[in-house]
Image (cartoon, rainbow, N blue to C red):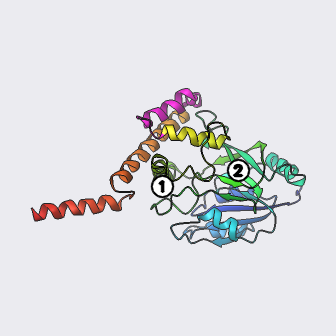
Amino acid sequence: MKTTLPKLPVSVLIPAKDEESNLPACLESLSRAAEIFVVDSGSRDRSVEISQSYGAKVVQFEFNGRWPKKKNWSLENLPFSHEWVLIVDCDERITPELWDEIAVAIENPEYEGYYLNRKVFFLGQWIRFGGKYPDWNLRLFRHKLGRYENLNTEGIRNTGDNEVHEHVVMAGKVGHLKEDMLHIDFRDMYQWIARHNRYSNWEAQVYLNTLTGQGKDGTIGANLFGTAVQRKRFLKKIWVRLPFKPFLRFVLAYVIRLGFLDGRAGYIYARLLSQYEFQIGVKLFELQQFNGSLNQGAEASALKSLKAQAEA
């Protein structure tokens, strides 16, 4: 006989759009949460229906193209019933072992927030190497004390309405939980490539901000001797100035970080990361050539050139 475990005083936040393939497994894994909010962005599939069938509260979010994006808007506006919020993407799962650890962590908390380690699966396989594990994300925290940073990337088209790689800034100490959160995307490779095409728009703007100093390293800042995130920001200042980044990205993931030990899946993943880096570089070049504009700058330049040829 299956034992029903008590609900934990945690409010879960799930950002969603057209996620009918991932939501059932995600929501199944969240049965121990006392409250679940699915913040939807006008899904055209069965995402809303599926969410409601699991007892989740569905809220619609309309992005104004600037700030805030979905997660920060949710943290500011949703009527959470509990002080602890757990942010889970649709392609993520919270294991029973992690729930047990969460229960202990929030009962007598030593910290105001906790990092969760993601175990990423790709092509049906855990990507253990290549720099993908450990993959720490600050996802469990007192919702009044944490907000996602602003990296000054507003106004860039086709990046989506959800935070990409922004980090949560906490007013308080943070710790780490030991049990892994699973990242298993049931969508196909087309969706992976389409998603990273959007992400590369955002990354190109971050690269430009880093080169020009416009972003000022975000809220967290860059510091070689600071936290893990601050060290990563410091190294990124060097990275964006390096030549041959797509090739270096492949070598870093596949050779230096032992991605080859993940077999064919590791090779494919490293190649895709290299392609992703190439896309970022092309879009960065576009931003630099056309005064900080993607797409529309090139279109305007082409029209100007045609007009000049016609008048000649």
Q: Mark 2 points at which residue?
A: 138
Q: Which range of residues does the magenta coloring cover?
A: 240-263
Q: Position of residue 207 (x, y in %)?
A: 47, 47
Q: Is 275 situated left or right of 84 in this image?
A: left
Q: Position of residue 110 (x, y in %)?
A: 86, 48
Q: Position of residue 189 (x, y in %)?
A: 50, 48
User: Residue 157 sits in which quadrant?
Assistant: bottom left
Indicate the secondary structure of the residue bearing disc 2.
Answer: strand
Name the residue rendered at 50%, 37% in the picture: 238
| Quadrant including the N terminus | bottom right
- Packing grade of label 2 (10 A; few <14, some 14-19, many >=20) is many
Q: Find residue 163 and name its label.
A: none
Q: Is 14 situated left or right of 245 in this image?
A: right
**Is 55 situated above or below 277?**
below
Cα separation between marks 1 and 2: 23 Å
Name the residue rendered at 62%, 53% in the picture: 219
Q: Mark 1 points at which residue?
A: 198
**Is 168 situated above or below 16?**
above
Taking the view exactly as shown, the residue that stands out farthest to the left is 312
Residue 259 among those drawn in magenta: yes
Residue 123 visible in rendering:
no
Q: Is 78 situated left or right of 158 in this image?
A: right
Label 1 or label 2, whichever comes before in sequence order: 2
Name the residue rendered at 76%, 63% in the picture: 144
- Residue type (three-letter) at the residue carrying disc 1: Arg
**Is 84 situated above or below 247?**
below
Indicate the secondary structure of the residue bearing disc 1.
Answer: helix
Q: Camera-side residue: 306 or 135?
A: 306
